[in-house]
Amino acid sequence: MNLLTDPVTISHYLIVGSVMFVAGAVCMATKRNALGVLMGIELVLNGANINFVAFGSEILARNPHYRLGLDGQIIALFVIVLAAAEAAVALAIVLNFYNNHATVDVDRADELKG
Amino acid sequence: MELGATLSTLLLLAWLLPLASFGAIVLFGPRMGRAGKAAGYVATGAILAGVVLSLFALGFWIGEHGLGESLHGDEHAEVKAGEEADHHGHRHDDGHAKKFYSGDWYTLAEFGGLRLTIGYYIDALTVVMFCMVTLIATCIHFYAMGYMHEELEDVTDHEVTLANGEHLRRPGRYHRFFQYLSLFCFSMLGIVVAGNIAMTFIFWELVGICSYFLIGFYIERKTASTAANKAFIVNRVGDFGMIIGLMAIFGSLGTFHYEEIFAQVRPQEIYTPTETIEKHHELTVPDGMVWAEATERAGEIVMDHAGQEYGLENAAAQMAAEANEYRDQGFGYTLLIIAGLGIFCGCMGKSAQFPLHVWLPDAMEGPTPVSALVHSATMVAAGVFLTARFFPVFTPEVLLVIAIVGTVTLFMAATIAITATDIKRVLAYSTLSQLGYMMFALGVGGWVAGVLHLITHAFFKSLLFMCSGSVIHAVHSNEMTDMGGLLKKMPITAYTMLVGCLAIIGAGIPLVIGLSGYYSKDAILAQAYVFGESNGSLLFLFVIAAGGAAITAFYMFRLWFMTFLGEPRDKHRFDHAHESPKVMWIPLVVLSCFAVFVATPPITDLFNPTAAPLVRMLEQAVPNGVAAGGASGGIVIPAEADSHEHTVHVLAGFIAFGTAMSGLLIACCVYWWRLINPDEVRAMFAPIYRFLLNKWWFDELYDKLLVRPTLYIGRFIAWIDRGLIDWLIDNIARWARGFSDGFDRAIDRTLVDGTVNWVARQTHAVGLALRGVQTGRIRQYVVLIVVGTVTMFVIAFGLSK
């Protein structure tokens, strides 16, 4: 079986999703810039979203036993909304942090360490 | 309304008004007017209303019963045949019995056969005593409003020196004085009206406590507080005997009520199953007492009938049938004597009879109105009153004891009074002596004579005390050696006091007329003479009593002469002396009128002493069967009527007159005309003088005999307490502490605390260790989350494979 030649199936979507997820996670783990971290979060969330959409798609999930109906799509919409809200809050925090510390370096935000 | 109900209502009101006044002053006293001045008005108003009610009661009594016949007419007072006992319990005895009303106002409690009630026993004696007590108390209340006026301000007590050398300054206690006076009047009237012995005993003690409060009124003075204690403790001794008497009566008769006791002790008839024995109120040992002593036979009877049907009823019937037989064998008589002696013991304490007399002279530490009210006219009279009330119960043997105690008291007190120089102490000893006369009179069978002397004495002795108070008020000293020549300065006091002195020595023209004391003292001596004639060997009692009369005359006029005649001994005090204010001398005048006229016969029958209204009232009150006298154990108690024989009367009259005049004459010789120098007499009889001056060394004797040993025992017990018991307890405590210390260390600190602390320490260590993980670096967290998640996936899928 060759993914590059086979027709598009759910596996392709899952691969794209996991690549995005890993890229996001690595981005969160490596970026010191808070905005970079936020972008990483977006990647993680959207990677997960691709999975939901893929599992919810009737075209892709041909096996009737795996049919989720609209659930996958709806959860994906929720995630998008939550991501937007989260981004708003996170950006506000970042702005405040910048105001106080004149930087957006997340390594400097260690005041709550034990 | 029926008379009994009327009387009981009137006397109840008269009795409770002082209580109301007491309550009001207790609650609002200090706020009554300036410095509590109105408290005096409240108390006086209450007692004044009491007089009015008592006089109404007297009026109702006379209206119903008349004054009674004088003894020369008909021996037995005229009595209306009458209504049987009605359902209220007011009894109107018929036949030749005397009149009384008895009943209960309120039942406190009932335990089986025991009934504790607030009740009344009203006879002519009660009514007369009510009038006397309230009347004198009213005079004294008015007098006290003047005498105590210093207490309205802050008082500086010159007899109390504080540690810093200054005199004590304290707020006035005017209201408190009247509060106690009210309580006292209430208690005294309670004794008089009481319908049973239990109630009498309660008020007996209340009188005692009031006396304690009033004697100790100047509580900061050491002498006053000691005197108050002494009075209270000596009275306890007497009351102990009284409780024994009460127990003897209640234990055998099963009742506290006077009416029932008297009915059993002085029965009119005794019913046995076979016959009816006429007793005519002779002294009879009640069945209860017979069986209380004939216990063996009583036990047999009960055992014989035990377990049978109607066993108890049959046993009771058989006991009733046999009671007479055992009574005739003399069973129960000892118990009757014990009961009598016990009750009299209480009377001895309250009436300050030898050997319990020591408290009364010391009690003069109280303010003078207190001396007048409590220690001359009323409280000490309570003992005599109770002796008179209980008279039907006393056997001739007990009466002999009473007579002898009375004689000793009257003689001893009279001799001590000769040498006393404190004006109030002279009067105190004179009171003792007169109380001795009363007891003596009762003991020799002179019921009317004794009670008559109680009433007349109450009037002239309160008069004398108030006069002495007036003098003390003027010269600010109790010592007669600081007085002299005061007649010019305070004539009203001097002349009223002269009246009092004449009354107390029984001045009068023999067989014609005299002051109140003349009648009562004559009656006592006449009765004593008849008693001496009946019991030849006891004639010496009469001689001592007559001699006592001479000494009375001597010391009373010694007092009067030393105070009012001669040269002033203390110029400074004399110059400051002045007549007392109106509120003080008006009661004196009122009382002196009573002291003169209270026992005077009416003008129509002037030369017959027994025709006096007071005497005729008292004749009505003579308890059933008492007038006939009695005999037992070789002692004959003569009937009182015998002393009214003309020959006896004349003899006693002249002896009384002769002794009084001789005493008076000697007093005149020594202290007025100065024919004899008292100092020389004193030097001549130095040992006797010392003996008398030290009051027969009674205080010293009691100190050595009773007080010291008690203190030694007390100290010994204190030593045991501290040295032994405390030592033991301390050691036990030490051991207990040591043990608990060890226990504490071993279990609590090591085990319990150790565990808890170990857990805490470990938690802390874990916390410290985990602290390092929280670095604050978000990127590290993310890596950890990812790595962790992946690890968990690997584990989960790896294991499930």
Image (cartoon, coloured by chain):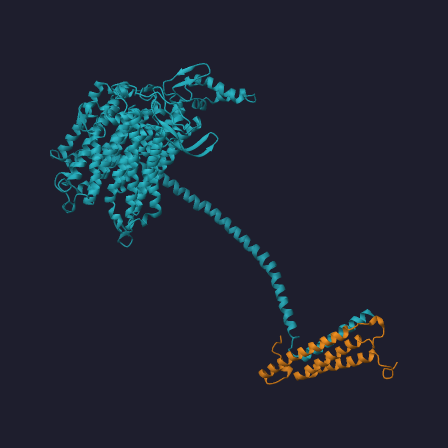
Chain colours: A orange, B cyan
| Farthest right residue in view | A1
Query: Residue B358: in sight, yes or no?
Result: no
| Farthest top residue in view | B274
User: Where on the picture, by quarter, is residue B146?
Assistant: top left
Q: Is residue B691 left or right of residue B760?
A: left
User: Where on the picture, by quarter, is residue B779?
Assistant: bottom right
Q: B781 or B436, which lies in front?
A: B781
Q: B130 or B398, which lies in front?
A: B130
Where residue B782 appears, as percent x and y from the top left, is: 70, 78
Q: Residue at x 20, y 45 (%)?
A: B476
Q: B558 or B324, which lies in front?
A: B324
Where residue B498 appears, as percent x and y from the top left, is: 17, 35
| Farthest front residue in view | B1
Q: Is residue B126 left or right of residue A69?
A: left
Where residue B741 appears, as percent x and y from the top left, is: 54, 55
Where residue B266 appears, as percent x and y from the top left, is: 37, 22
Question: Residue B227, relative to residue B662: is it above or below?
Answer: below
Q: A44 or B80, which lies in front?
A: B80
User: Where on the picture, by quarter, is residue B334?
Assistant: top left
Counting labels gives 0
Question: Residue B150, relative to residue A85: is it above or below?
Answer: above
- Give the quadrant of the N terminus of chain B: top left
Query: Residue B791: in sight, yes or no?
Result: yes
- Give the quadrant of the C terminus of chain B: bottom right
